[in-house]
Image: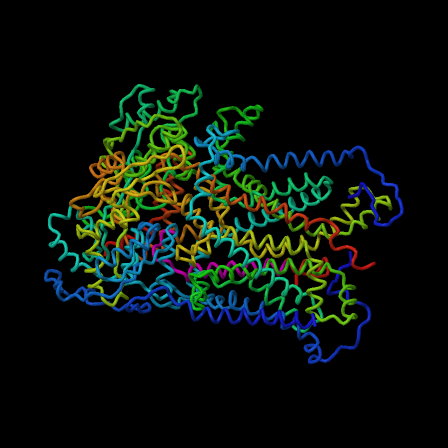
Amino acid sequence: MANETKTNSTELTYVKKKKKLAPFEIANYILFILVGLIILIPIWKVLVDSLDAQSAYSFRLFPKKFSLAGYGVIVTTEALYRPFLISVITTLGGTFLGLFLSTLGAYVLIQFQMPGRNFFAYFLLFTMIFSGGMIPEYLVMRKLGIINTLWVIIFKHGMNVYNLVLMRNFFEGIPASLFEAAEIDGCSPMGIFFKIVLPLSKAALASIGLMYAVEAWNDYTNFKIYVTDSTLVNFQYKLRNLIMDGDMPNTTASISQNMMFNAAVMSAIIPFMLIYPFCQKYFVQGVNVGAVKE
Amino acid sequence: MRKTRKKVVSIALCCAMLASITACGGNNSDPTTTAGTTPASTTTSSGGSSNETTTAPQQTTSDVVKPDSLRIVHDGTILTEGLAEFGKQISELVGVNYVLDQQDHSAYADAVGRVFASGDWPDVILLPAGLYATYATTGALWDMTDAYEQWKTELGDRLVSNVNDGLKINGRLYGFAPTRGNGCITYVKQAWLDAVGIQAPTNWDEYYNMLKLFTENDPDGDGTNNTYGVSAAGIIGQEAPYTNFLPEFYQQAYPDFVQGDDGIWYDGFDTEEMVAALERLQSAYQAKYLDPESLTDGTKDVRNKFYDDKFGAFTYWAGTWNQNIINNLEAQGLSTDLVLLDPIDGLEQYIERQSAMWCITTACQNPEGAFEYFIKPMLDDGDVQFRYTYGAKGFHWDDKAETVVVGEGDGATSTDYQDGEFHMMTNQETKTLFTKNHLDPALTVAPLSHAPQSQTDAAVESNEFFIANSKLAPFLPSSDVLNDYNGDLWELKRKVITEVVVNGNDVATWMDHYRTNSAQMVEEVLADLNK
Amino acid sequence: MAQKNGSNQPTVQARKKPLGMQIWFYRWFYVMFLPVLFFVIIMFYLPMFGVRYAFYDYRPVGEPTWVGMKHFQALFSRDGFWQAFWNTLQISIIKLLLNTFMAVVISILLNEITSMAFKKTVQTLIYLPHFMSWVVVASVFSLILSPSMDGMVNGMLVDWGVIKETEKIYFLASPKWWRPVFYVINIWKDTGWGTILYLATLSGISPELYEAAQIDGANRLQRMRYITFPALTNTILTVLILNLAKVMNLFESVFVLYNDAVVDVSDVLQTYIYRQTFGQGVPNYGYTTAVGLFKSLVSCILVLGCNYASKKVRGRGIV
């Protein structure tokens, strides 16, 4: 970042590369190693227990009896394949709908001169404060006839005012001069939306999209309330029923119950652990730069 | 061209969304195809009035009309795996189309509330103990006393338990419990008893001494003093019968309203027995013979501690859990020799909790038919009862020649069966054997005359032990006044228990605190219950 | 970074057009807003009619009956309610401030790391706790904070000689320690997740600004203070105000961590109501709706208050 200067020009420039790190940076690295370790401790316990056929109550550094059987059960159980698919469907659907509505809404909300814009803003914010409660929501969903289908889940995740406001914040960061330039060029609002706003909001779309995706993926309360058809439940719900909830005994001779439980917990963490590094390239600095010479 | 195309696309998307919503409204109607469910109304059908005599039966079986279909709401006690197959088989056997509507098991009370609130009432609904009494008084459940009494005479000797008679409210029965409830018994590690050199305790002093030795004499032999005598998930439970995890301490004390033998209700918390129980708890907790973390631990944590050899006496559910505990101890490399402790003097018997009940709602068009063709077949000593007990043929059990594989990988075992040999099949989701379906063969009130063993010896043994050593928990009171004050009363009770047991304060002072603060509420509740 | 801000309009201001022309000018925006409007009405406003049940006795069986202010009277007359209410405000707001502060600090410091590989690893690691459910988190932390020999924290304290072996602290059951421990666990769980937003905002800062500042002689601290932090202010304020709306909803994290011994310091409104309604058998939705209405009113006051303060200080609120 601040150590090097690079230019795209063809002339040779002297690039000064610092050979040693400033004390601040060393301290920073050390700090984050410590932070990383501290964050890791509870996760490590879950990880170790998920790989330990003799998993115990107390804390261990390494599994006493290493075994992948816990994960084996989760991966080979056919009963989990369909719920996994359902999770993917509802996550993609919810994220897509969510991003669609948030970006449209946010784009409209930054039109400060538009009549009614303030009204729309308050209209949206009001819903964050007042709510009818779970039973009226249930009854409305029932009237719409979408109970016990996947639509109710997708709709519930698609409309999130919190994320919409955050998206609006990101859009506000786009320089006004860009909009003016486009208008002068004769671009319509939809055109500006697709050609300018969206391409410049990669970081916003990635981060808010991630938020939608995570919420949809981890959801199980909505399934508890709205979906009773056992062929339509998602991965989290099925996992909970299978392993986590209740005092219904699971007389397994070969696989420790605690191990399966912890493997289930880890399997909730692992998908996003793998996805995040791919999202991170959108958080790279300078993505928005260069469109207009200030 | 591109601009207009984008405009068209966005408008089209909006329209598509609008269309899909309205279209969905048409397709997905309620998942029921029953004959007649009416919205919430408190019309009572023929069995409800209290003017009619209870001696003469209302109708003979020849008058009862067979319904075309019945909608049943239930929880996870009818196995989810294979539910469709099970439903199909019993529908065929009885000749009625059963629509089995399974609700979320872990928050079933909420689900029941939603089912009723939506106005779309089922014909039959399974209600756990806590819900039965309260829904009964709202008039939502059909009075089945007469049908039950007649059936009782028909069953004759087959009926081995009259638990349903004890579940009547003011002499009327609003639901039927096909099994007795389960309960907890105390498991003690034999290896620990041997290590500290004592026999299984028979009275409180011996029990207390056992806890002391378990805590202080390093029974697990690892050289450090890191063990406890007993541990539990909470010093007092969250739901009835409240005292089932620490029965030796509570003995005869029961912390809720109880109906005495003379029929008068009284407050079980404000009694000598409760004071004694609190004193016992206090001394064990302060001395750390009772694991202090019992205050915060959940059932999973306590189980894991037991498997990790952290304490020696564990009170937990009888039946299949016995086998489960043994399996887990074995997986940890510990001895699986457990003593099923006879109830100590003062305790006399373990507590059997009230079981869930099948109730017919007042929205059912043909309640007599529902009783005749849903409830009675459940205990018909034939194919239907067999399926309620063991599951669907060909899914949960079978009697054809085949090989059954249990477990996975190295630990997998396979057994061969001949034609005609009854055997349970493997649950493909967990790779374990199915053990039973809705009815526990050991607890059924009218058992099968030929009930093959589907559970392991340990499970059967502990079931028999429990039945021989238990009595029913006090019946749950139902009263609107109590519902209003229940939250506050329990706040007080838990405060007293925590102050005395955890903080070591004087029992008498805190009992006075309870008495003064609850006096008015208790008075009103007792007036309502004893009217 | 140029900000398009509602209050600083470009200087050339044409004479105001009549309303009809303005609506026509913005017509496509209205069309774009239609799906949002549609969903909001269906998902939020239709159920909102249920708020009226706060004044009824609404049970699953039977028709709702009007009871007026009965539920509110029942609520306000109980001491437990007020204690829970004040606890909620205190715990929730402090938790919000701490979490936001930590997330911002971590984001700014993480932004300074140059090694991409290191940055990515740390980022992935710190946001993992968000994916563990509270039930599991409570279970693991109960173990870590256990007053027995197995508790890591007590073990370390004894090893370092801070406390004697007989003096082990039962953190989760101690009214003195419960809240600090609660805050720490919350920071552990949600800081990483919060950094996503701030890092995304920081990625929008042009590197040229930093270079220009460096050329002008600003040191690292000054660069952070004059460039990095102001860029985040808008996001921070938005997040704070939006989360104020949710402050009263605090439930699950407290529910899994509290117990009878610390009720006085830890009981929040939702847990109090949960206990009240737990043993009731047939639920009374009117009562829970009344509580919901009360919570909404409090949230409204908080949000409006903060919004007003924000307007006074920074010239604009959240709208």
Q: Quadrant of residue B28?
A: bottom left
**Residue C257 visible somewhere in the drawing:** no
Query: Can you say which quadrant of the picture contains the C terminus of chain B?
Result: bottom left
Q: Is residue B308 above or below residue C61?
A: above
C290 part of magenta stretch: yes
In this orientation, which residue lies closer to the viewer: B43 or C291?
A: B43
**Residue C243 visible somewhere in the drawing:** yes
Q: Main secondary structure of the magenta part?
A: helix
Q: Is residue C25 above or below residue C53?
A: below
Query: Can you say which quadrant of the picture contains the N terminus of chain B?
Result: bottom right
Q: Position of residue C47 (x, y in %)?
A: 48, 66
Locate residue B132 relative to residue B28 in the image: left or right.
Answer: left
B247 part of magenta stretch: no
The range drawn in magenta is C278-305
Locate residue C141 relative to residue B122 in the image: left or right.
Answer: right
Q: Quadrant of residue A125?
A: bottom right
Q: Position of residue A287 (x, y in %)?
A: 73, 53
Q: Is residue B527 above or below residue B334?
A: below
